[in-house]
Image: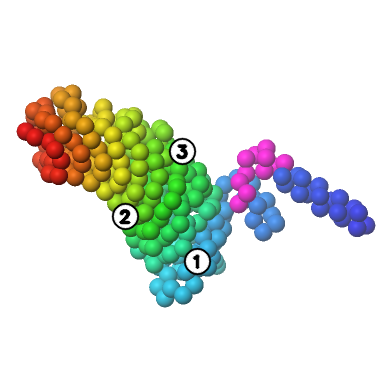
Amino acid sequence: MSEDETDHHSSFRVVWLSFLILVTGISRTEVIRGRLVIGESLETDREILLQLKSFLQSENPVVVNQGNYSNWNSNDLSPCNWPGVFCDNATNRVTGIDLSDCNISGTIFQNLSALTALSYLDLSGNTIGGVIPEDLGRCQNLKFLNLSHNIIYGELNLTGLRNLEILDLSLNRIQVDIRLTVPEDCRNLVVANISNNNFTGEVGGVFEKCWNLKYLDLSTNNLVGDIWPGFDRIQEVSLSDNGFSGTVPTWIFTQNCSLRALDLSENEFFGEFPAEISNCKDLEVLTLWGTGLQG
């Protein structure tokens, strides 16, 4: 075969692969080591996890105890027995990663969205820094996301995570408008903890459509504004140590109030505290110190 023919066939192969990727929706990670893997599989999940391991080891070259990922063996055909990896036996896909307390520093791996069945991700208790990459916002099947107890800062956008049920970003250094933190469609959100950060902006409207939200901790941020409608659907709420202001309206505590614990301390509220709090029959804890509220 002539050199021109070789170049022609090579070019045709590249064009054909590109066409298949475009038409079938195959992600870039499914072209592995020069061969095309049709569809999503445990094999592609395994390859992505090995990429993750390599990334973490390059970010943490001198760590003595590298945690779960150091035991991910490239000779294993399946990653489902690897420590910190969870699979769904029915779909034969990787659905969870737990790398909490694994002495991880550096930044967050930027190809997690290629694990298209991933629903559980726990990276808490490390010293991960930098910003949360846009790629994480494309992990649309995530139900559980815990990035707490790290040193993450800067911007993030999680508005596309419509299946999210549990979100924990507490104890970081994140500085961004709160509207970029909560999924636009938040009907599945049950727990949201973004305490001890530098979140900014007005909260009003952000959680109004989070119909199933039961636990909300916004404490120790730079949030402002008023208390919002639907507030009393939540069971446990902490707004402590922010810049919330104004009066607490009487209509906020409805007959169907679900509140069990409410912390409004260290804010700029003022005026009479509503007697309608008595509608919250299950309320056990009410904290108002450090405000101008009376009654």
Colour scheme of the rendered structure: rainbow
Q: Which residues are the magenta region?
A: 19-29
- Residue 14 is left or right of residue 250, and the answer is right
Q: Is residue 27 magenta?
A: yes
Q: Is residue 228 magenta?
A: no
- Residue 162 is left or right of residue 26, and the answer is left
- Residue 240 is left or right of residue 154, and the answer is left
- Pointer 2 and pointer 3: residues touching (CB < 8 Å)? no
Q: Residue at x 39, y 48 (%)?
A: 175
Q: Secondary structure at mark 3?
A: loop
Q: Residue 206 appears in which quarter of the rendering?
A: top left
Main secondary-structure element of the magenta-colored stretch: helix
The one nearer the camera, 211 or 74, is: 211
Q: Residue at x 16, y 34 (%)?
A: 270
- Of the numbered discs 3 and 1, the one sitting upstream in the chain is 1
- Of the numbered discs 2 and 3, the one sitting upstream in the chain is 3
Q: Which residue is mark 1?
A: 59
Q: Which residue is mark 3?
A: 160
Q: Which residue is mark 2?
A: 171
What's the amino acid at mark 1?
Glu
- Of the numbered discs 2 and 1, the one sitting upstream in the chain is 1
Whether residue 160 is visible here, answered yes or no, is yes
Q: Dot 3: within a 10 Å radius of its alpha carbon, few (fewer than 14), some, or many (20 or more) residues? A: some
Whether residue 191 is visible here, answered yes or no, is no
Indicate the position of residue 61 as horizontal and vertical percent values.
49, 72
